[in-house]
Amino acid sequence: MRSSPRAEPKGTGEGKSRVGLPLLFWRPFRRRGRKEEWIAALGFLSIGLLLIVLFVIWPSIRTIWFSLFDSEGFAGVRNFARLFGDREIVDLGRFLRREPPWGALLHNFVWILVHLPVSVGLGLILAVVFSKIRSWWVGIARGAIYLGIVTPLIVGGVIIRFLFDKHAGMAPQILGALGAPTPWSAGWTAYPETALLALVIGSIWLWTGFSMVLHSAGLSTIDRELYEAAQIDGASELAQFRYITLPLLRPVTLVVAAMTFLWELKIFDIVYVATMGGPGGASNVLALEMYFSAFRELDPYRASAIATLITLFSLPVGYWFARRRLRR
């Protein structure tokens, strides 16, 4: 049988030339386009990268370098050993046995231990409660709670100072009317027993709005049909919260907890304005101690060691957060 002239073998050289010829002309233009895109991208990013190098990377390298020296020369890790032996940083002899000061590092850990679960948990609960209530006052309540996170921390420190003041503060006045003894009925920020607690309680209001807003955004992504199916099966509100809301909000909660931890570790503004680390160092924290070392004692080596210590505590959480973002 004679083959049809239309039936040409696909693997012939003529077929390859017909397909390959346009590709040969197209590839240089495609490569040239990619190269131009890379050049344009680098041009747009160059200013930002330059600023990051000048104001973030280079100062960080210099800070770590300074932390390895003292006034006599190279010190290695001796600066860090001195920090852990300094009662202004760690005072295990007084910790939980007597009233503060316990050392700036332990004050940070106490702050994290109390503030992190309360602010994250309270923000989650408020987000769930407000999502189930349909009333005119919900928007006002959300705005009042979120007001804390948009308030400058300097202003927040002033508010905390007046909130726990003996004469103007609401908390001492109420406790004094109930017959509470001093220092609970006096100015909280003026007594070592209550100064750190006053700052932690005030910071809970300043940060709970952040947790509430992120959890509210997470709740809006959960399919409502899951709750409807659970209600049909007879699940209670508590069961729905435990088996639907909590598991599906777990990624959001982890992000909020990580951001809260980093915020607490480098807290400075509130303490500086409200108590200046006092009385007697009872509310001192690492960032404030770093400031004192650098600008009061004029000891850049000790200040650099404290800054490096804060960075080392932040790295595991920062590394986890970066990996999580890259996986997404």
Image (spheres, rainbow, N blue to C red):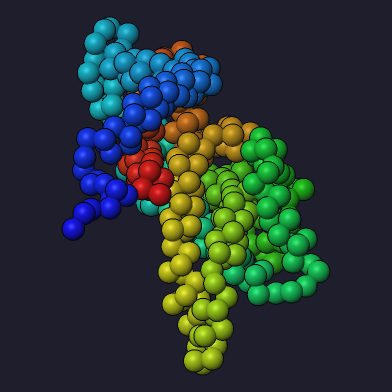
> Does 29 sit left or right of 212 as displayed?
left
**Residue 62 pos. (x, y %):** 37, 15
* Residue at the image point whose x is 26% and y is 35% from the top: 14
**Residue 188 pos. (x, y %):** 62, 48
Q: Check the image and report above or below for 138 versus 104.
A: below
Q: How many marks?
A: 0
Q: Check the image and report above or below for 207 versus 157.
A: below
**Residue 22 pos. (x, y %):** 38, 30
Q: Nearer the viewer, residue 241 or 262?
A: 241
Q: Nearer the viewer, residue 211 or 162?
A: 211
Image quadrant occupied by the N terminus:
bottom left
Q: Check the image and report above or below for 16 versus 181.
A: above
The quarter of the displayed image where residue 152 is located: top right
Q: Check the image and report above or below for 82 versus 216.
A: above
> Does 79 sit left or right of 284 as displayed?
left
Q: Nearer the viewer, residue 327 or 134?
A: 327
Among all residues in the image, which is located at the extreme right? 136
* Residue at the image point whose x is 31% and y is 16% from the top: 65
Among all residues in the image, which is located at the extreme top? 72
* Residue at the image point whose x is 40% and y is 27% from the top: 26
* Residue at the image point whose x is 47% and y is 31% from the top: 287
The quarter of the displayed image where residue 135 is located: bottom right
**Residue 30 pos. (x, y %):** 41, 27
> Does 185 sit left or right of 33 as displayed?
right
Q: Is residue 107 visible?
A: no
Q: Is residue 75 visible?
A: yes
